[in-house]
Image (cartoon, helix red, strand yellow):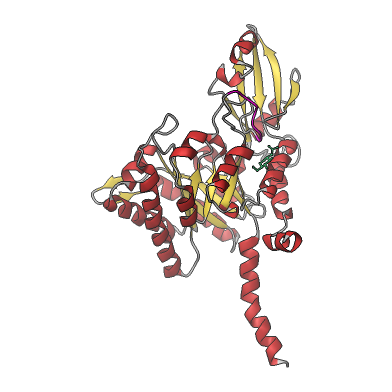
């Protein structure tokens, strides 16, 4: 046998495996134990053949006990049942533990050396005791302008906390010889993005930044708008603009994972007031009602709805008249709006997407094939040529 050829194959095999795993786009399904329990959805139902990554949402912020920080026992039990269900069914699927925290929680934890170490230590227990493949920080509303609820120092202490966490995650990867990852949830709110992040450093320190679609400023009628509506405020709330901010501020596109919510938002308003708010229905019903896809798909199939398409949001909506001279408008996602969002993911060369939540989809198949939106998004992700393909094609 030709010894050189043999050596060559041996040497190139690990390289090929490494390249293919590094280059493929990620598809991440989130799972909320609280929401899943309400509808009797078990961890065993998570379709791992379409969800190679599962993100558990979420651990509540650890409490400070003496010099330690400890996670809640119920969260640990719920997380362990997801991990054991996934390990039992797959050797390759990975589970990320997300940690929720208010701006105040994270400001306190990050602003003193001792607390940063305690938080990193607590994170290590998630990796080594509970066998998480990664952790994600969901630091809500950092910064201190009207959009943030933390401190003006968050921008600095955030980087310090991530440095400590990166070291802890690396050490945990070595001790069990398995790669563990550090993820960070990023806002798409213009004020938060401008003030609260040192994006260059944040992106350098973490494996992925997950861009949270629910943080978008609610100025548009569409709840997950793709493009900006021309306005005198010139804010630019469409994802095409807000996600580009992360890239322009020094984040490698392949580290970014765009969040896509499998739900709609319903708003009730008075059509007679519409002209006073320049057609912005959300100003008349700021909060709205959250409708998961599995319920929503049935609701909008009923009689009495008028179908429309929001040109700037690039999303569908339905409206209907209600008694008392009111009207209802539901903004939602369909295969057309998701196709346009995926075109953007592909065009901007993001690292992939995550969906909120896998159990929000039409899990029972009430309106067609079960998990139809999830399956579509997964197939789109798989069809994106690898970065190597791009390199050959374009460079
Ligand atoms: C989307 O963003 C890219 C990058 O900033 C820009 O070149 C493109 O024109 C935008 N597309 C639209 C339709 O606004």
Asked whether residue 391 is drawn in magenta, I would say no
Dividing the image into four equal quarters, which quarter contains ligand 1? top right
- Residue 141 vertical position relative to residue 178 in the rendered view, above or below: above
Give left or right: position of 167 versus 252. left
Part of the protein shown in magenta: 226-232
Residue with the most extreme left position: 66
**One can see residue 357 in this view:** no
Q: Is residue 176 visible?
A: yes
Q: Residue at x 74, y 54 (%)?
A: 383
Measuring 68% from the left and 44% from the top, which residue is drawn there? 344
Tally the marks: 0
The residue depicted at 64 percent of the width and 61 percent of the height is 23
How far across and how far down the image is residue 69, in percent?
A: 31, 50
Q: Quadrant of the C terminus?
A: bottom right
Relative to the observer, which residue lies in front, 33 or 115? 115
Q: Residue reaching furthest top?
A: 324
Q: In this view, does 46 lie above or below 149?
A: below
Q: Main secondary structure of the magenta part?
A: loop
**Which corner quadrant of the image does residue 13 belong to?**
bottom right
Task: Please provide percent x and percent y for residue 311.
Answer: 72, 28
Residue 353 placed where, x, y %?
62, 48
**Looking at the figure, which quarter contains the N terminus?**
bottom right
Give residue 5's quadrant in the image. Answer: bottom right
x and y percent of residue 351 in the render?
A: 61, 53
Residue 115 to residue 313: above or below: below
Residue 227 highlighted magenta (yes or no): yes
Q: Residue at x 65, y 65 (%)?
A: 20
């Amino acid at each position: 046998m030709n010894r050189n050829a043999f050596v060559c194959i041996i040497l190139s095999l690990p390289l090929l495996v490494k390249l293919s795993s590094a280059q493929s786009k990620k598809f991440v399904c989130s799972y909320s134990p609280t929401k899943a329990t309400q509808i009797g959805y078990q961890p065993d139902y998570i379709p791992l053949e379409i969800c190679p990554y599962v993100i558990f949402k979420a651990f509540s912020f650890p409490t400070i006990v003496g010099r330690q920080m400890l996670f809640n026992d119920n969260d640990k039990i719920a997380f362990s049942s997801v991990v054991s269900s996934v390990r039992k069914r797959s050797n390759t699927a990975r589970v990320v533990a997300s940690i929720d925290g208010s701006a105040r929680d994270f400001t306190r934890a990050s602003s003193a050396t001792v607390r940063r170490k305690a938080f990193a230590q607590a994170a290590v227990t998630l990796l080594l005791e509970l066998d998480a493949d990664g952790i994600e920080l969901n630091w809500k509303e950092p910064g201190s302008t009207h959009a943030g609820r933390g401190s003006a120092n968050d921008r600095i202490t955030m980087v310090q906390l991530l440095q400590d966490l990166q070291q802890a995650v690396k050490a945990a990867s070595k001790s069990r010889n398995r790669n563990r990852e550090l993820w960070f949830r990023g806002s798409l709110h213009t004020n938060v993005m401008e003030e609260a992040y040192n994006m260059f450093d944040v992106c350098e320190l973490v494996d992925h930044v997950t861009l949270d679609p629910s943080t978008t400023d609610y100025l548009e009628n569409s709840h997950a708008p793709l493009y900006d509506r021309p306005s005198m405020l010139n804010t630019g709330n469409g994802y095409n603009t807000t996600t580009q901010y992360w890239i322009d501020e020094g984040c490698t596109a392949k580290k970014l994972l765009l969040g896509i919510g499998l739900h709609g938002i319903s708003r009730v308003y008075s059509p007679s007031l519409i002209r006073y708010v320049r057609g912005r229905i959300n100003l008349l019903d700021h909060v709205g009602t959250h409708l998961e896809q599995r319920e929503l798909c049935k609701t909008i199939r009923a009689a009495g709805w008028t179908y429309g398409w929001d040109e700037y949001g690039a999303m569908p909506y339905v409206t209907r008249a209600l008694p008392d001279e009111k009207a209802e408008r539901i903004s939602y996602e369909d295969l057309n709006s998701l196709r346009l969002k995926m075109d953007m993911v592909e065009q901007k060369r993001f690292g992939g997407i995550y969906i909120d939540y896998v159990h929000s989809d039409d899990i029972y198949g009430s309106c067609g094939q079960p998990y139809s939106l999830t399956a579509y998004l997964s197939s789109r992700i798989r069809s994106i040529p690898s970065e190597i393909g791009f390199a050959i094609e374009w460079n």
